[in-house]
Image (cartoon, grey):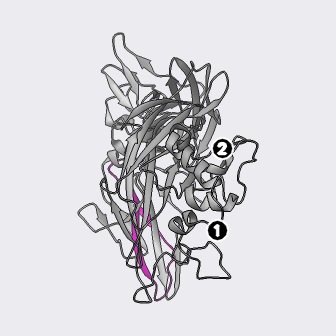
Amino acid sequence: MYYFLNRLYGQTLSCQLPGRAPFTGGNVTIFKGNRFWHIDVTDQIEVGNRILEVLNQPIASNFFANKIAANTHATQFGIDPLQYRPSSQNTVTNTTDSLIQYIDTVKIRILTPTYLSESKVDSLVTVKINLKDTITYRRTLLLFQGEQYSTTSKEDTLTFNLKINPSVLDTQTVMVAAIYDSLGFTIYHYGLTKIIVKPDSLCQQLIVSPATKLLNPGETYIPSINGIHPTYITSIGLNDPAISFSIADTNVIRYDNLQTRFIAKDTGYTFIEFSYRGKKDTLFVYITIPSNEAAVVKECPGQTIKYVADSIQDASYQWQVDMGNGFIDLSNSSSINGINTDTLILINIPTSNRGNKYRCVTTNGPVTTYTDTKILLFGITWLGGANNDWNNPANWQCNILPDENVDVIIPTGKQHYPTISSNTKVHSVVTKPGASVHINAGIILEIKGK
């Protein structure tokens, strides 16, 4: 009798019989130690009457003959062979075909929850599904927060009670699929809706981990962000509308809004302050040079720069550049030459290209190798041979003035040290022991980098 009830109404009805243990012959979903059953029938008295009617009928009566087709598979009692065939097997033509799938609101429709309705974490959400047609219907699947639920009940309205995972907030998708058999084809009719999961209590603490992160130039990173609540911990994504953050120095790291991640840009360090529902935490970021990259060389602005790869007989060369979004092949231009040789030549390249990374792809038969990455940085040293005027090119190495993309070094032992008499921008200034920089009153020296 247990098996019959499972076949007629779905495996969950047996748990409603007084004094009986829940049915354990099928697959069930266990979430935090609780079992969830399809129990919509508890609200329908007529279903209960039908169960009582079945229980009071003799097994040899016409009642069963009218309800259940005669079994023609003596070794497969109670098993419908169509239900257990490979889902892509067409039993009419005896061929293998692709599954037929529809996004559909005719065969199946989600009644509740409504689209973008709000639910609290660690609570139950009731999903009601309307089946418009139960002819050739096999079963219904429901997917929510990585869990799968199913039923073979043919009631017009199916109900699932789902517990919301407290570790996930923001928008969550509920997907249902009604599975039908049509002339030997398995057909899936899909319905979708979304709910907004809200915390049921105030966030007590925001934790960004790790608190300190070392990154290589160009490396991407997504921090782990958690909200601490009185009875649970939530995982917070960067796309959560309640999370906000500010980067202290966008010359060191930037945020990719399209792919919701951070991208390291240059050497140095900075910090990112996160805020969530009134709570804050800070992530400190340090950018380092990987060990497989050449030692840092800072070039004079306006000069010809050469990067050289190993010369290999019969090899082909392709120089590439990474401007912050990954390496791409270079093309020759008025300022770039030698892209298909062992020597790349950059001619009077603007300082706005600071931070670009260059490498050569060398192909020799089936073997492809990459050179060490060269990072384009600009730097000049104060000479002070003419006077103390910062704006006099004769006082600078390479006879050129620094700008906001150039690192400046003021060494010791110079006859003159610079005086800044107009607003000035540089990428960084390093003053050696005994050296000095004088800034006139009312003048601003802006440091754009680290």
Q: For the residues marked 1 and 2, what is the alpha-carbon distance in whole angstroms?
A: 25 Å
Residue under the image location 43 percent in, 39 percent down: 254
Q: Amino acid at mark 1?
A: Ala
Residue under the image location 34 percent in, 42 percent down: 399
| Boundaries of the magenta span | 300-322
Residue under the image location 53 percent in, 42 percent down: 40
Foreground of the two, 77 or 443? 77
* 19 relative to 336, above or below: above
Q: Which residue is mark 1?
A: 60
Residue 441 place in picture, x, y as percent: 36, 10
* 54 relative to 195, above or below: below
Foreground of the two, 226 or 80? 80
* 92 relative to 25, above or below: below
Cβ atoms at labels 1 and 2 below 8 Å apart: no
Residue 2 place in picture, x, y as percent: 69, 58
Residue 371 place in picture, x, y as percent: 52, 68
Q: Which residue is mark 2?
A: 16
Foreground of the two, 388 or 373? 373
